[in-house]
Image: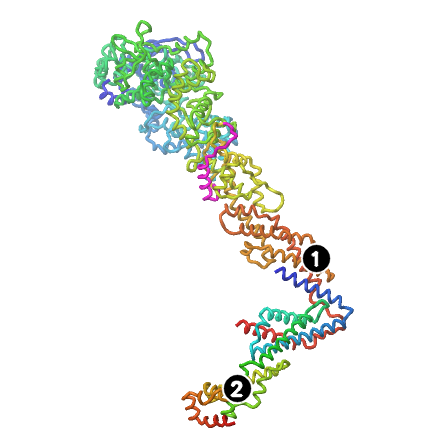
Amino acid sequence: MIIAELQAKKALAERWAEAEADKDKLEERREREREFATCYDNFIDLINKLFLRQQLLPLDLENIDTQILQNCRDLVKQGLSIYQRQQVGTKNQISSDLAKQNRKFSALIKEHAEKFRNASEVIDMQQALEATRTIAPGSVPAGIFMRLKKACDKDATPVELQDNLTAWQEAQKCLANSSLKDWQRQLLQRITMGKVTLFDLTPQEMSWLHDCGFAAKVKLRYEI
Amino acid sequence: MNKEIAIERLNEVIKVDTTSSTPADFLATHVPFRRIKLKHGGGLGMDFEEVSEEDIWERYVRSPGERHQFVVVQGANGTGKSHLIRWLDTKFKAQPTDGEIVIFIRRSDNSLKGTIKQLLTLKELQNLPHRDVYERLVAAGRPVNPQELKNELYHALLAKVQTDITNGNTDILKRNQKKKLLSLLSNQTFCEAYLMKPNDLNAPIERIYRRVATDGQLKGYNEEPARFQPSDFYLSEEFVERLQNDQADGKAIDFVYELLEPEDERPAATATYLNQFLDSVIQKAAGIHPGDFESIFAEIRHELYLHGERLTLLIEDITAFTGINESLLNVLIDEHTGTTDGAGSERCRLSSVVGTTTQFYGEFRDNFRNRVTEEIYIEDTALTADRDDALLELSARYLNALSLPASDLATWAEEGALAEKLPIHQRVEQSYWPTFTLPTGQVLSLYPFTALALRNLVAGMREGQRTPRYFLTDVMRPTILHVIKDTLVAFPPVYTGTKPNLQWQNTEDRIYIMGQCSEEEQERLNRFVCIWGDGTAKQIEQDNISYLAGIPLPIYQELGFPNIHGRKYTTANTNAVSPLSSVTKKVASVTQNTAKTPTKYDSQRENLDKWLNGDVLMDDRNEIRNDLSDFLCSAINWQEEGVSFDHLNKIVGEKTGAANRLLAIERCSRGEGIYQLPARLDTYRIIDCLLKWRHLGQCSWTFAGAEEALYYATAWLYKIKDEVVQTVKESTANMEGTSAYAECALSVVVCCHMLSGGDATPQTLAQTIFAQDLSVPLSSANNLHCKDWNNLLSYLNKRPEVADAMGVAHDYFNIKQSRYPATKTFFNLSALQKSLDRLSKHDYLIPDAEELGKDDSIGARKTTLKPAGHIAKELPKVVAAEQAFWQDKMQPIIDAFDLEAKDLISFNANILVEFAVALEDFFQAMGKANKRNCVAKIKPQHVRDIRNNADKIAIAVRQAAVALEPGKIQVILPQLAQASLGDIKPLLDILQLAEDSIKKTVDAMPGEPPMPKGYVSPLADDRDLVTQKANCALAQLDSLREALSL
């Protein structure tokens, strides 16, 4: 395709022109390239964070769409090319583009941390873990409650986010391995949250609480 | 005539060789020779005496006493030489003379050996003492296988030529010519095809053989002398090819070429050369040594002398002695007294009467001629014009003999053959038929002839053949045969051996008589009235019998003619025409008109009259034909009959100036035409009408009798119109009613139109042709089309026939008010549309165009065929070549924009704009990078032109793409013509420049710009790690996009 070839040759020519222009301003060039490296590194990092956060809790579609992602993709590739060529010309806008995108991503992460903090899924998980721990104290890993909340921090690092994700998986595993059936856990969760009185219990629930010895613990709980 | 007897007797009585008939028939049919020319001595003098046959008998034959005689009877073939000699023999037998032995040597033993045998049968020679001579004679007469004898003749001839080449005794041919001739004579192909052609009685060796053979099985009569003739060496070009194919000797082929030379005397010289050897060749083949014959005769004469006898030798035909001519003549001139040798005085007297043709007598050497004592010349025969009674007597005698049983005549002959007692047959025909009265008073019937018929039939015989023999074979025999086969309704027969004058005394009479007879009978009646009668319409009454043209009317009825009547004449106002009277001089009516000065009409009318009577119609200025043609052209509504004026004009040569080919007249001095008017009465009359129109009415129908003439012309026109129109239509190949030449013109025109880019749908084409919006596409010198395309355009521009075709395509379908140029066009649209529809099924091509006019005699109709044929042949090739040409041109576009060929159909202008922008950007960037030299050839203006003309270029590309699609010529051709390489060429040029520039860029900028010396980019440190992370980020982004899209 001759058009693509022409465009490629045009870009190459431009780089040659810029290289020529930078010939006597190497410091400026170095600074420019360093700035690019920082922005690009940051950009990659933010993408990583967003990816992990999306795993934890879907991002808000109002702030990110496929077009943004495509632009980001182009930026990543463009950045890679720059890394390959090791040249950032004076007229190259990629650093500012990256900075702009980074700001957008930082805001997005901040919003996501806020959303994560109030996310019902997260709260439900914590309550379920707590109900499980109430009935079977040794079945819930220690410290998991803290780990499940790391994404609430807007500055959480990818490692922390990854740990949060791991904790989430462990929590799900914990609930899955519990002897409690879902309705039993939910019953306990409701009791724990103080949303259930004896009058609300069905004969079946009453029977289960009684037969399995849980009634005493519930009572105890009531007593507390 | 007694037909039953005649059937039996015809072949007995009418014999070619009269001497072979029975004595009774011979005497019954003999008509005395009354005027024979006689000359004393055989020199060249012309002092002839006129004598009768009785004078000859009495003075020279009956009793010559001791007078030695050598009498030569000469005359043309068939004049009666043999007849006279046989009559002399008959007289001898009737009145024998003591001491005179008469030997009659017949032509029926027409060969050397036969003659010798005949001599040996004489009782006077039975006791001839010299037995060795007899033995040799018998040996000469031994039966020889025919083919063996022919081979002997042939090889003897070859040996003679071979010997002559060695010895060089003759000088008619040069030595090298003799060698070539020998080679030809030796050639097997020549031998089989000419010299000894099987089953050809006239082959030279066969001819010679038939004169010398005595096997008695030869049939037919052959008067050709046993000699080579020039015509034996008239060879053909095909024969040369045969010789070459047979790989014949080069000398033989050379000689044939020399024989083929026009106006060369070589055939005659060759014949003369070979004839020199014939005598000795025949002698050798016949086993006779030179001098044998003379010694045998000397012995015979001596023996007769001893017996006190004298010898009279009646030789019917001396040409029978071919091969020993010289020896025989030596014998005949050898007198019994005065010889030097002792034996000479003991020979008997010899009187010889020898028949020979004038031609052969001419070959007598002078020393023989000088020894001829009397020369009898039979010139004046029974058929000579001023001896009418002899002709009638001859005919009457033969007709009588035919109707009599042979026994009756035999009895008469035995009883002395007295003339007054000649048996006369009983007439069975009507008494109206004429008779002839013999000097004895006996009346013989002339049925089925009249005196006029006999005279006219003899007058029609070829000069030199007006002899009794030819009369009997060419007139008498066919007429009798016709009658005895009872085919009187077709009487009289059509003769091949005589061409009697069929001229009427005047045309009015002819018209008058023929008008009463159906067309089928006219020719027979014409023959009968002109040959049997006097060629008039005169009807007279005589002795209560009506005569028409001198023939009694009942005879017409007997012969099955319709009831016809002539113009009434009384015996008072005309000379009575007797059936036996001399022919009325037909020139009388002509001489009567000499008093007044003949007008142009008169002379033309005379010309016309002569034509009707068998002469050639003189029309050297084509006036008659043109008048007839104009009459037909103007009187027939040709267009209504489906013949366009354009077609008609081409036939009559209206615009082309060519000869008028509409009509031909039988026996006309000039002109060929597609419709032939026969030499018949109705043609005569229409021509007469038009002669009057031209000469009496000064090209108008205003003359006395014009109404009648116009009426006749109109009636004639309606009679022949359909046939003429049909002939015109069928005179050229046509396609469902449209002439082939017009279809070819349409083909040429439409193809030109398509080559100009014009639409080829039949509907629009009709409009185009109607509007005469036609032109030949101009050929151009630039290379916007392939070579074949340009060649075809060049042909079309150069050939005048193409321009003609433009005119024909329009004019042929134009319904005009007259044949002459008109300004308005009224189109026969349905015919045109039909032709176009038909042609469109074949892409408007007519592959066999040139074949269609192969046999057409009208040149103007051929002009369109050639270009049509050429186009049909070339156009498919041109289209294929042009498509290949365009494919070649389009390939850079396909490659540059990464397209498939099919994508060109939807080629968009946007891509060109994008290309132009990219090119401009590239151009500028290269400038900034100080690499302008790489793009030096790209002019910004050219790039701008691409951008500005993007739509136009895209259209041209799409047009070309359509033309490259497979399909019918009529679809592709206009597209190819419309596709403008001129529009596309700037794009092709700039693409080429762009690619060149890109290639140069590679050299100028082999890769990324090099790092400044000593500079290490911060990006170099963790390049690999970043690359890894970046790749991971790309994967994450993809995952994110996927997750978001769910």
Along the line of sight, the residue nearer the viewer: A116 or B801? A116
Does any portion of residue B96 appear in the rendered image?
yes
Few, some or many C-alpha atoms within 10 Å of disc 2 (few <14, some 14-19, many ≥20)? many
Q: Secondary structure at mark 2?
A: helix
| Residue picked out by circle 2 | A127
| Residue picked out by circle 1 | B935
Does any portion of residue B69 appear in the rendered image?
no
Image label count: 2
Report the side of A62 relative to B819 (left or right). Answer: right
Per the image, is B91 magenta? no
Q: Is residue B1006 above or below residue B80?
A: below
Residue B95 in the image: x percent, y percent?
A: 27, 12
Q: Quadrant of residue B577?
A: top left
Q: Quadrant of the N terminus of chain B?
A: top left
The residue under the point 58% across, 46% down is B787
Residue B271 in the image: x percent, y percent?
A: 46, 27
Report the side of B859 relative to B464 (left or right). Answer: right
Q: Is residue B777 above or below residue B261?
A: below
Few, some or many C-alpha atoms within 10 Å of disc 1 (few <14, some 14-19, many ≥20)? many
The residue under the point 45% across, 44% down is B841
Mark 2 falls within which chain? A
Magenta stretch in the rendered image:
B820-846
Tell which tag, 2 or 1, sits nearer the viewer.
2
Along the line of sight, the residue nearer the viewer: B520 or B586? B520
Residue B594 in the image: x percent, y percent?
A: 44, 8
Q: Amino acid at mark 2?
A: Gln
Q: Which mark is residue B264?
A: none
